[in-house]
């Protein structure tokens, strides 16, 4: 695993910790956004580890992530789709107003759980030695 990959995974885990802390104070929008960012950084880790190139935009990360996971048996379809579905949480928190700007805490909690599974699976796939201690 490259140092850059490790940094992406560290960012993913930090975002996941933030998401859990934010959910504890019942801020669904912010917790959902942080869950998405955890998945985003984990996807960046996979992309960098496999291509040695950094994908920076959300669209670029989403596309490369799906391409790299084509046929990957360790990640089920729900986890493959979480990155694009999770982006909707970020977009809701960042761009919506009024009643459309609300992310229920139950939805944020489910997103955190999915993001955690995705971070763990990606760490396992790329051979992160820290994934064995989790």
Image (tube, rainbow, N blue to C red):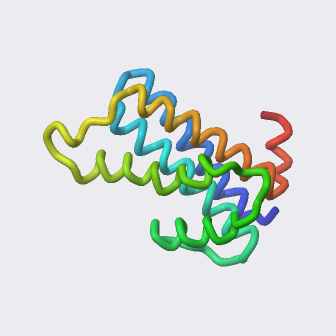
Residue found at the very far left of the displayed protein: 98
Residue 124 image point, x, y percent: 80, 49
Q: Between residues 32 and 20, which one lies in front from this camera angle?
A: 32
Question: Residue 109: x, y in percent?
Answer: 48, 29
- Quadrant in the picture for the N terminus: bottom right
Q: Is residue 99 left or right of residue 90?
A: left
Q: Residue 68's x, y, as percent?
A: 69, 69
- Image quarter where the C terminus lies is top right
Residue at the spot 67% in from the left edge and 52% down from the top edge: 9
User: In this picture, is 133 found above or below 106?
Assistant: below
As drawn, is 94 to the left or to the right of 115? Answer: left
Determine the residue positioned at 42% across, 54% down.
87
26 shown above or below 11:
above
In the rendered image, the vertical position of residue 43 relative to residue 130, given as above or below? below
| Residue beneath the point at 62% across and 39% down | 116
Q: Quadrant of residue 3?
A: bottom right
Please tell me which residue is depicted at 61% across the width and 74% down the height of the picture.
Answer: 54
């Amino acid at each position: 695993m490259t140092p850059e990959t490790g940094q992406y995974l560290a960012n993913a885990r930090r975002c996941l910790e933030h998401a859990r802390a934010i959910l504890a104070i019942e801020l669904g929008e912010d917790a959902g956004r942080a869950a998405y960012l955890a998945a985003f950084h984990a996807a960046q880790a996979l992309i960098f580890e496999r291509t040695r190139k950094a994908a920076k935009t959300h669209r670029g990360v989403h596309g490369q992530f799906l391409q790299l996971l084509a046929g990957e048996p360790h990640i089920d379809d729900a986890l493959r789709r979480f990155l694009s579905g999770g982006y909707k949480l970020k977009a809701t928190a960042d761009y919506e107003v009024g009643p459309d700007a609300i992310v229920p805490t139950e939805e944020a909690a489910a997103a955190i759980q999915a993001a955690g599974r995705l971070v763990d699976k990606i760490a396992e796939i790329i051979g992160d030695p820290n994934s064995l201690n989790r």
